[in-house]
Amino acid sequence: MSNNASINGGVGSGISHDSTKKHANGTAVYVDDIRVPENALHLYAFPSPHAHAEITAMDLSEVESADGVALVLTADDITGMNDVSPTHSGDDPLLADGKVMFQGQAIFAVAADSLNQARAAAQLAKISFKPLPAILSINEALAQDSFVFTPQVMAQGDAEGELKNAKNTLSGKLNIGGQDHFYLEGQASLVIPQEDGDVLVHCSTQHPSEVQTHVAQVLGVERNAVTVEVRRMGGGFGGKETQASPWAALAAMTAQKTGRPAKMRLVRDDDMIMTGKRHPFQISYEVGFDDAGIVTALDMTLVSDCGHSLDLSRAINDRALFHADNCYYIPNMRVTGLKCRTNKVSNTAFRGFGAPQGMMAIEEVMDQVAQKLGKDPLAVRQANLYNASNNTTHYGMVVEDNVAPEIIAQLKTASNYDKRRAEIEEFNANNEFVKKGIALTPLKFGISFTTKFLNQAGALIHIYADGSVQLNHGGTEMGQGLFTKVAQIVANTLNIDLEHIKITATNTGKVPNTSPTAASSGTDMNGMAAKLAAEKLIDRLRQFAIEHYGVAEGDVKFLPNRVKVGKQTFSFKEFVNAAYMERIQLSATGFYATPKINFDPETGKGRPFLYFSYGASVSEVEVDTLTGEAEVVRVDILHDVGRSLNPTIDLGQIEGGFIQGVGWLTNEELFWNDDGALATHAPSTYKIPTMGDRPDIFNITLFDNENMEDTVYKSKAVGEPPFMLAISTYRAIWQVTKGNLDAPATPEAILKACGEPS
Ligand code: MTE
Ligand code: QUE
Ligand code: MOS
């Protein structure tokens, strides 16, 4: 091999996801694929039939004596704390204690030899309830001042005063629906009891350290007695950040009390009923603007339906406020966030984490302004963009990396926007019932956890004496390709082929105190931690070469798969073995904490994000105004991932995120009946997009850019931002219906917005 050959699978190469083949041939191991020992127990949790009620009596004797039942667990059986809240101690009881707060809340759990036995036994419970009045909507919650947290305001300028001075004003409302995560693999945990009452928890979670924390808290033991391992998830999308731990904790209690392995896997219906979803939002706004369509003042309120407890709702509602400007400079702006408590399952993180709802709000405003003035909606958007002189957000952060104007201009040309818009106008003039719409929307998404302490990550790298490498870090793999990207980063840093780097399962025993793999920052943070660990190893190896071979620092070169020391060249393997023989430590940790960030909720000001990711999309839709059916016929996307670490994976994230967003805004409708029971709890009644919903023409291009901040190989986060590209699809449908179109734009909603044909 020549010295200037480069390594295989390094940074920037579009190699496939490390599990692609295993996904296809069925050898990728998920929690449910782990062979359970023969004496394992299987758990079922009994869901509350009421949305809000007091439990007046409970007789579980028949459950206990049913076939195959080994154990029945109630709140009284918890040795530690009856709580699995991530943010507010006592807010999320593991098992209901005296009252239930939502339909589907776990009241007791049964462990039996099989899941069917456990479920059958649970039906024998005799429980008496005294139903209480339930709050089931945002409007009821607002009327009763029912909130999970205090309001947050972010403001700049004088929105109230400038609304009075504005040439034109408009006000309006928009309701935005929730979304089920519909990960292909539901919540699942398998707990294997260890010596001394310790537990090993295999769990499908984005947040192993929080599962560890909650299991320890429920068992009443220290965290060092609990090890959580995650090889991969069959999708997480935010739904396995906080809401994986209850099921792990119930299985752990069972293992602790019986000494037997215990498994808990929610079937689809139970998963949909018992776990939280994307927050529905109600938006109201008042906007002031001049005749050119420049928004001069905006006062907006973003109200979220949090369900019965706080969970992550504070940070989610805040992120909605942080994104209520999207790419637009609004000199006088005030946004208020209200977090409603309702008697529903506690809503949680979902791709975008509130930002999609915030952006939906401002994009509605942009279209309303354009419509009022009879202007091209894209021209109005472009006139309001952040620019070099107007670059301060309503939360005081300066937008330094603004590429939105350039992305929009490029995409507008590449997608032939002007020509197609004219053609669509003509088409619509000539067609009575079938109408077309086109819309371009941009996006700017802040990268970093707005909860500062979460912006940290660790990695652990071993080089074995044969030159092979084991890589571990705090991030989890949920299909997004994190493990592959981090391995590419390590391959680059050590300058060896990717095939020598073994990816290993996330394990709280290897890297402790990890943050959730969330906020799209998995690669930014764990990739940087792994790079730092690999650099430590390189430094140590270089020092070894200098001392052992007596050469100058500049005479040690780490070439692809080779190390050159003075005039000698070794294979990486030979060189590593030589270092081992000289007792050089070949294992290192790396730690990264995101720099520059701060935010003060008191003042609503700061720099919550290290940088922004950008993108834009153009959607063209065809709507049958007699049936309300809409088809997405063409989509063009230009998206900013900085310097791509892996263009294949990045394109997959953009395509998948976009389609998931289209599902949220078109097909996916959650329906609760008047008793607060979720009626749409299976794929028969809840429709996620299918292959048929993929637009026939779907052009995705990566924007040529590099991160101006010092991120890993100048890359940018990609996980969540593309989800919000789907807003252009909703806006294109709105171009047809106008008027009051709530989200999701189902055929029913479209038909309602179109009104009766004349
Ligand atoms: N992609 C797949 N295939 N599956 C997932 O569950 N989750 C998304 C996104 N992309 C997800 C996904 C969400 S919500 C986040 S926050 C990021 O991936 C998390 O991973 P990252 O930080 O490594 O991008
Ligand atoms: C984006 C996110 C998260 C976030 C903030 C963001 C997130 C998350 C938390 C969070 C907040 C408080 C806690 C906690 C987690 O904040 O995913 O345990 O106490 O979990 O801007 O994605
Ligand atoms: Mo993603 S919602 O931050 O897990």
Image (cartoon, rainbow, N blue to C red):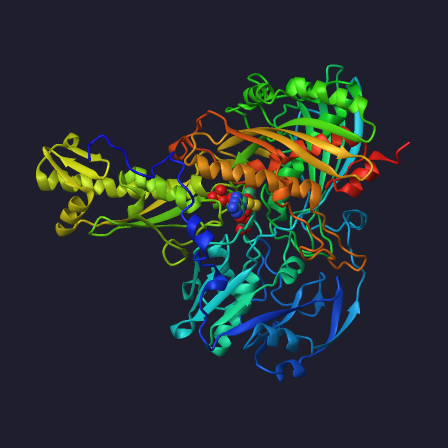
Q: Residue at x 50, y 71 (%)?
A: 262
Label count reads 0
Split into 4 quadrants, where in the image is the N terminus?
top left
Q: Quadrant of residue 665?
A: top right
Answer with left or right where residue 609 lies relative to residue 442: left
The picture places residue 172, in percent across and down from the top left corner, at 79, 32
Q: Is residue 380 visible?
A: yes
Q: Is residue 226 above or below residue 380?
A: below
> Nearest the camera: 723 or 84?
723
Q: Residue furthest top?
A: 292
Q: Residue furthest right?
A: 758
The picture places residue 249, in percent across and down from the top left corner, at 53, 66
> Nearest the camera: 281 or 685?
685
Answer with left or right where residue 413 lies relative to residue 151: left
> Nearest the camera: 371 or 321?
371
Q: Is residue 159 above or below residue 77?
A: above
> Nearest the camera: 398 or 177?
177
Q: Is residue 718 visible?
A: no
The picture places residue 6, in percent across and down from the top left corner, at 27, 33
Split into 4 quadrants, where in the image is the C terminus?
top right
Q: Residue at x 12, y 49 (%)?
A: 582
Answer with left or right where residue 481 lies relative to residue 584: right
